[in-house]
Amino acid sequence: MSPALVISRREIRTYFNSPVAFIVVPVFVMVTGYLFFTQLFLERQADLRGFFNIMPLLFMFIIPAITMRLLADEKQLGTLELLITMPVRDWEVVVGKFLAAMALLCTAIGLTLVFAITVKLLGPLDRGPAIGGYLGLVLMGGAYVAIGVMASSLTRNSIVSFIIAFAICFSLYLLGKLTQFLPSSLQGLVSYLSIDAHFENIGRGVVDSRDVIYYLSVVTVSLLVATLSLESRRWK
Amino acid sequence: MSDVMIEVDGLTKDYGPTRAVDKVSFSVRRGEVLGFLGPNGAGKSTTMKMLTCFLAPTNGRARVAGFDVFDESLQVRQHLGYLPEDTPIYRDMTVLEYLEFAAAMRGMDPASSGARIKEVGTRCGLSDVAGKLVGELSKGFRQRVGLAQAMLHDPDILILDEPTSGLDPNQIVEIRSLIKEIGQEKTVILSTHILPEVQATCSRILIISGGKLVADGTPDSLRAREKGGRYRVVVESNGVAKEAIRDRLAGLGGVARCEAIPGEEGTHAFALDAAAAADLRKPIFKAAVDNRWTLLELLRESASLEDVFRNLTQTEKGNS
């Protein structure tokens, strides 16, 4: 097995050995469940739109919480030294951590399929937006997780790591809300950088390569920065 | 593969403006147990971190198992087993889980690694705690887990940073004999500031102080460098005042220091330090005859490694 997978398997085990998985996942399901079912019972509307709309904001709190200690803790406790002096490349460490957080995130997202099933039972489920929405969740979640891993590589303090990740995600989110104040020449570029606009596009059920490429680029750049940050201990 | 397993040439490491390791050069052959000795903060750990590819040298080169630590770090790490200071091991895993993780990270075949884990675990005395969480173990057991993970893949070279710290005397003896055994066919570098430890385990000693290499040799050759030595003299009291004898002895040529030490009833005991290269046996005997003391004991102690160490590391500090 590749070292990256060995690391992610260990990390997943740590999630479920520690309170992280048992706090973050239920909180996530509770918050989304509350929003979904109040809409269902109070507005008598059985659809997933409200649930999807809140996700760019909710991810901002949930995801830094699951990524904050991935590398910061290893530095703090010194375990990074033992890990990294094993025959493993720096990028394999970063990718292993990323995959572990993705696995936990996908578990949480998977639990919310209950909402989709509820909608299906109560009435017609709009297939395209539902499938697109879930695909978008995974892509956007991936971008948040990668940013979280990067933030965690930059510090040895988990709390600082949380704040950095939150600040970056929130800035990317704000960009999309600011476009109307900008000159029209910049609007296109800035709105492309917005982290939730692409999710909305995919959520309409239209998977455009531009949106997918955006998320994949964020993931690549963030993981690259994290790798460089690990490598920096060996800079002369 | 040649017999030289580790070759270090002009290795230097700067942390910002401070120089932690200053142009250290040495080489280690297969079958040697090298003791790395020095006061705290002398640069022992930093040197080890460079050899294990955790840090890059600012200047100089090091080759481990024939590979460069900077350019071929992956190959270097494949040939190494490393026990860092303070044994940083994931606390939320059991001993067995951790060793399985280490085996998988080393790319060991899961089918065969089970037997190897068991073998190494037994050798390190971990059989009884295999199912316990690392975080619940005492320091001594954690240290053994660290040692087990370093030996797991049967590496050519073991680098152990203070392998016996936190162990009780029985465990220290066990670990030392384990290291000696491994050292028969492998190369071991261990760091310590406990002097009897190197005397007991190492075939060669490097003393490092203020980042510089100040001595390199076998324990015996290092001890021989230290000339002079220490003498123990016991004289029957016979009503002679202790102070009078002490002053006489201190006045002998070649005596650097003389002090009275507790002795048996009716005797006076003294410890004398000789100035460099002086043999005090004759003058002491003569002084006893001239003054009609009854000499009960005259013992020359050869310099201990402690003296060598203290002299080397303290003069170094005085110079800088």
Image (cartoon, coloured by chain):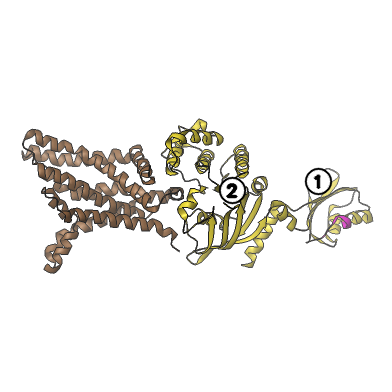
Chain colours: A brown, B yellow
**Amino acid at dot 2:** Val
In this orientation, does residue A183 appear? no
Q: Position of residue B95 (x, y in %)?
A: 46, 36
In this orientation, does residue A22 appear? yes
The residue located at (22%, 54%) in the rendering is: A215
User: Would you say the residues marked 2 and 1 are in contact, meaning their CB atoms lie under 8 Å apart?
Assistant: no
Magenta part of the protein: which range?
Answer: B278-283
Disc 2 target residue: B188
Instruction: Classify B103 as above or below B85.
Output: above
Please tell me whether mark 1 sits on a helix, a strand or a loop. loop
Please tell me whether mark 2 sits on a helix, a strand or a loop. strand
On the rendered structure, is B120 left or right of B205?
A: left
Q: Position of residue B224 (x, y in %)?
A: 75, 55
Q: Residues within 10 Å of mark 1 (few under 14, many from 20)?
A: few
Residue B176: quarter of image: top right
- Give the letter of the chain under mark 2: B
Q: How many marks?
A: 2
Residue B177: quarter of image: top right
- Give the letter of the chain under mark 1: B
In the drawing, what numbered circle is on residue B263? 1
**Cα separation between marks 2 and 1:** 43 Å
**Amino acid at dot 1:** Gly
